[in-house]
Amino acid sequence: MSKNTNNNPQSLAKIRLDKWLWAARFYRTRTLAKQVIESGRVHYGGSRVKTSKEISVGDELTIRQGSATAMTEKTVVVEALSAQRGNATAAEVLYSETKESETRRAYYAEQRKLANLARPDNKPNKKERRDLQRFKSNQD
């Protein structure tokens, strides 16, 4: 059996998960994609997967990205396969995000924005700091 060397997105039947995540520009390197998969941030069918899992068109993946404080979770459907990393417009055709995932991410982004409203937009200047110190010392 000969190996398929054609990287045309329509010609591939299956591809390794780490390679597809890299080609779809979810992660900068394949090594990083591998580490993320092994840490359990990528799920296929609701369960953890291995790096070597082969995916095909129509599969649904749940991908968690970002830091612990601003983590976003996307549920995407694989639309096309590619073993080559292209620009962002080429990567957009490889997947589509589900409507539920888009609304969930928008909701959490709004919640994060509302949580930041308690913080002032700027630091107090020297006079305002002195006033705050006077106020605090008078409260004691």
Image (cartoon, rainbow, N blue to C red):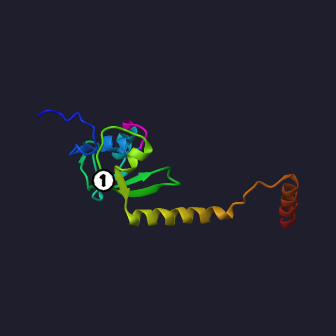
Residue 114 seen in the current view: yes
> Which of the 4 quarters of the picture holds residue 118?
bottom right
Residue displayed at 53% across by 62% down: 109
Residue 88 x, y percent position in the rendering? 44, 45
Bounds of the magenta segment: 27-31
Q: Position of residue 71 (x, y in %)?
A: 48, 54
- Location of the N terminus (image quadrant): top left
Q: Residue at x 43, y 41 (%)?
A: 87
Question: What residue do we see at 50% from left, 50% from top?
Answer: 67
What's the magenta bit mostly, secondary-structure-wise? Answer: loop
Left or right of residue 119, residue 83 in this image: left
Q: Is residue 19 left or right of residue 135?
A: left
- Quadrant containing the C terminus is bottom right
Residue at 20%, 36% in the rendered image: 4
Comparing 53 with 23, the one in front is 23
Which three-letter amino acid code belongs to the residue tagged 1?
Answer: Glu
The residue under label 1 is 79
Q: Secondary structure at mark 1?
A: loop
111 vs 124: above or below? below
Horizontal arrangement in the rendering, residue 126 relative to residue 73 (left or right): right
Q: Is residue 26 visible?
A: no
**Residue 22 pos. (x, y %):** 37, 41
96 in magenta: no
> Is 33 situated left or right of 8 in this image?
right
**Front-most of 53 and 19?**
19
Q: How many marks?
A: 1
Check disc 1: other Cα within 10 Å, few if <14, some if 14-19, many if 20+: some
Q: Position of residue 62 (x, y in %)?
A: 35, 56
- Which residue occupies the foreground of this view, 3 or 66? 3
